[in-house]
Amino acid sequence: MNQKQIIKLIASVFVCQLAGIIGSIFTFSAIPEWYFFLNKPFFSPPNWLFGPAWIMLYTLMGISLYLALENNLMKNKKATYFFSGQLVLNALWSIIFFGLRNPLLALIEIVFLWILIALTIKEFYSINKKTAYLLVPYILWVSFAAILNYFIWMLN
C-alpha cells in the first residue's frame, strides 16, 4: 500500500466516522435526559454497547468505501449516490430519534436507510464483492436497530 492509498483509506474511514460524530452530538445529551427513561424491550442492549458497535461499523464502511474508490466507484454513479445517501440518512436517524426525540419519524426514516444500504450493497457487489461483504454487519445492525426502534415507539 503506497502513501496515496493510505491517505485515501484514512479519509474514507474518517468520512464514515464523521457521520457517527454528527449523530453522537444529538445522542449523548439525550441518553441521560430522555432515552434512559423510555420503556425498552427486553432485548435492548446496554447503552455502552452502541458506541463500540458503531465505531466498528463505521470503520468497516470506510474500508468498503476505500475499496470501492480503488475499484473506480466514481464510474458507478448509482453506487456513489446510494452510499452517500445512506451515510446522510445514517446521521439523520440520530438527529430524528435523539435530537427530535421522535421514534415514529425515526422508524420511517430507518426504513429508507435500510433500503439505501441494501441498494449500496447490491451496487458495491458489482464493483468488488469485498466492498459489499464489508457492509453486511452494517445492514444486520440497522435491521436490529429498526426492530428496536419499532418496539421503543410501540412501548412509549
Image (cartoon, rainbow, N blue to C red):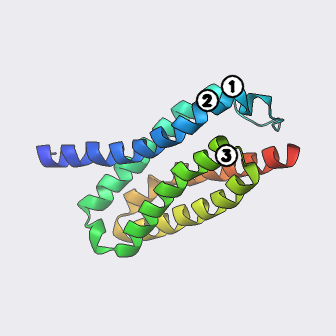
Residues at circles 2 and 1 in contact by the CB criterion of under 8 Å: yes
Residue at the spot of label 2: 29
Q: Element at badge 2?
A: helix
Name the kind of residue labelled 2 in the image.
Answer: Ser
Q: Is residue 153 left or right of residue 98?
A: right
Q: Element at badge 1?
A: helix
Considering depth in this image, is 40 or 57 the residue closer to the camera? 40
Q: Residue at x 57, y 38 (%)?
A: 26
Q: Residue at x 48, y 69 (%)?
A: 122
Residue at the spot of label 3: 100
Asked if residue 2 can be seen in this view, the reply is no
Q: Is residue 20 left or right of residue 102?
A: left
Residue at the spot of label 1: 32
Residues at circles 2 and 3 in contact by the CB criterion of under 8 Å: no
Measured in 3D between alpha carbons, the distance from the residue under mark 2 to the one under mark 3, in whole angstroms, is 12 Å
Considering depth in this image, is 57 or 105 the residue closer to the camera? 105
Residue 29: % across, % down = 61, 29
Tell me the mark number nearer the camera, choosing from 1 and 3: 3
Q: Quadrant of residue 36?
A: top right
Q: Which is nearer the N-term, disc 1 or disc 3?
A: 1
Quarter that holds the N terminus:
top left
Q: Residue at x 23, y 49 (%)?
A: 8
